[in-house]
Image (cartoon, rainbow, N blue to C red):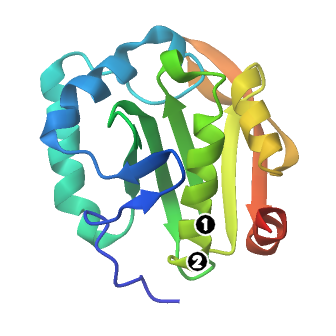
Amino acid sequence: MDKPKINFNEIKISSNNLFLKPLSKENATDLFALHTDEEVQRYTDVDIFKNLGEAQKFITEYTKTAEKAEFLFLGIFSRATKDFLGTIRLYHIDYKHRFATIGFQLAKDYWGRGQMHESLQAFLKFVFGELGMHRIEAQTFVENKRGIKVLERLKFTREGRLRQNFLIEDKFEDSYLYSILKEEFLKEAV
């Protein structure tokens, strides 16, 4: 399968209460706040920004490379207030075998409200439909109860435990590998 003829800088995905779109320079402060919140970052291997300039640079660099369709990084926004809630990313995209990995982060003010579930449903619909993916994977640390709950509520299958596969704060951490196939997602979406 060839790369889709979709400009990742122009993607906008909507759901009932949310919309997903690429971040702009105006979102740098929000992204910086998300990436410097230790509680949000606890269960990720995302680098913590040291200053606002790093967040601005990340957005600028993503914008330049998005047309290659190798990495998709979208902000999650409230349709009602336009507030920034978090991010979703698609990486390790393999168009030949039609699989990729997702990652997501949500500002803690929005935890437990169903926004990540809703945004991932809309995102997966796009990824399976518009990008033609067959399999989506996700990894989460075994202690990340909220991340596990989100994935299992979406009917991801836990495929196994990866032992000490991430080095976080000088300690090796285990993670769970989850996946969902296109037909499983479509069956649940009905």
| Mark 2 → mark 1, Cα distance in angstroms | 6 Å
Front one among 165 and 132: 132
Asked if marks 2 and 1 touch (Cβ < 8 Å), the reply is yes
Q: Amino acid at mark 2?
A: Gly
> Is residue 143 visible in this depiction of the protein?
yes
Q: What secondary structure is found at the residue carrying circle 1?
A: helix
User: Image height check: is 140 above or below 184?
Assistant: above
Which x, y percent locates residue 155?
A: 83, 51
Secondary structure beneath disc 2?
helix
Q: Residue furthest bottom?
A: 1
Q: Inspect the image, locate mark 1, and give the three-letter code of the amino acid beneath it.
A: Lys
In the drawing, does residue 98 fall left or right of residue 85? Answer: right
What's the residue at 40%, 43% (across, down)?
79
Q: Which residue is mark 2?
A: 129
- Residue 119 position in % (x across, y down): 56, 47
Other-residue count near label 2 (Cα within 10 Å), few / some / many at <14 / 14–19 / ≥20:
few
Residue drawn at (28%, 73%), measured in percent from left and top? 7
- In this view, 63 is above or below 112: below
Image quadrant of residue 44?
A: top right
Residue closest to the eye, 145 or 16 = 16
Horizontally, is 37 left or right of 140 in the view?
A: left
113, 174: nearer the viewer = 113
Residue at x-position 66% and y-position 20% = 172
Q: Is residue 99 visible?
A: no
Q: Which mark is residue 125?
A: 1
Left or right position of 18 against 43: left
